[in-house]
Image (cartoon, rainbow, N blue to C red):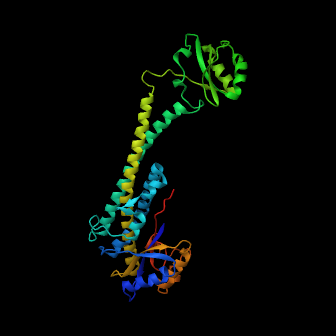
Amino acid sequence: MVYWLVSLQLPNKRKDAIWELLQEKTSAAALGSNYKLEIPELRVGTLDSLMALSDDLSKTSNMMEAVVTKVKRQINDAGGAKSLLELKVEGISTEAYVQRFKWDDAKFPARRPLKETVEKMTELVSRIEDDLKVKASEYNNLKSQLSQVTRKAQGSLAIRDINQLVKPQQVIDTEHMTTMFVIVSKFSVKDWEDSYETLCKFIVPRSSAVIAEDNEYVLRSVVLFKKAVDDFKAAVRSKGYQVREYTPPAEGSELSSAQAEQLKRDVEQKKTALEQWCKTAYGEAFSCYMHVLVVRLFVESILRYGLPPSFQAAVVRPQEKSETKLRAELESTFGGGKQQYWKDDGSNLGAGLLGDTELYPYVSLTLSTDYAA
């Protein structure tokens, strides 16, 4: 869902009159839905401090949006679309939170200097981002271990660890003799049996045995003299077979089935814990993001309209496929005859003052609650 956070100037009009006009021109015309946005009496400070803060707010809001997206991506990876639908901000859905936004004065006192407030919000979201990196890394490492174990135990013979398949009695290793192992496609088994004894010199006749097989491949052993190993490897590869090196597993290195099952349980527990943490982190990160956007709307409105603060703030939800008409209506109604000045003709007039704020004859910021993959 896309929302526009807008502030509309009050030239000789009361806030309620502006609100009624907004409703008449947009909601009544089925162009969108509007929700009043109550901004507390934030501490203004000096014009210079507001201009400096405006630049910082642009970067800060972009950073917070990126963190919110990362958290949602992790939730989607862990729990899928169903988990995304369950996300809450301060106990209510994201849509309801945006539409009924109330400034959290306990967490962010309105009379505190704006720079300090923004710094606290940034610190909270940065901590969430750092914690997410650590927790996601722990989960991914554990998941990678499980993937390797599963791959070795259940994958195709072409990729499985043959050390877990070969039994000690199937290996001959003396001063002069050794056993080599080769992966042969099932389509090439007859060719292997007809030709392996002549691949090079010093191969023991009739020494090839089947060690393991699956739907596609067969693992074969063959006994030869050690001095012929290099020639054998070259000949095998030239025929399109795959030589596999065998290393006897060290004592205690094999992962028992019980240990593998425990690893699966550990991965599931870590996944559930990460998902739950992300849901909590999402609520906090999105709340900070919304508060920063409100501060940004306030600051840009002061810089645009001047002091004392005199504007009506609102959250506007455009009707699908009506965005262009809605923008045109807002522009003609609240442009104050300055529509042409604010249009972007490529020269980006005013960009130095407004950062990356969208250029309209009223202040407008876009907020999306959709998941960006």
Q: In the displayed structure, does residue 21 sit left or right of residue 160?
A: left
Percent of width and height locating residue 352: 45, 72
Quarter holding residue 34? bottom left
Please tell me which residue lies in front, 331 or 57: 331
Horizontal side of 181 relative to 34 (left or right) equals: right
Q: Is residue 174 above or below residue 165?
A: above
Query: Height in image: 102 above or below 12?
Result: above
Q: Is residue 47 visible?
A: yes
Q: Position of residue 250 (x, y in %)?
A: 45, 22
Tell whether 250 sits left or right of 173.
left
Q: Residue at x 50, y 20 (%)?
A: 248
- Residue at the extreme bottom: 12
Q: Nearer the viewer, residue 175 or 104?
A: 104
Q: Classify 229 as above or below 118.
A: above
Height in image: 322 above or below 95? below
Q: Is residue 347 left or right of residue 126?
A: right
Q: What residue is rendered at 52% in x and 22% in y?
A: 247
Residue 285 in sight? no
Of residues 55 and 262, the one drawn nearer to the viewer in this rendering: 262
Q: Residue 170: x and y, percent?
A: 56, 16
Residue reaching furthest to the top:
175
What residue is shown at x 42% (from left), y 45% (from top)?
A: 271
Q: Quadrant of residue 245?
A: top right
Please count the marks in the image: 0
Q: Position of residue 138 (x, y in %)?
A: 40, 42
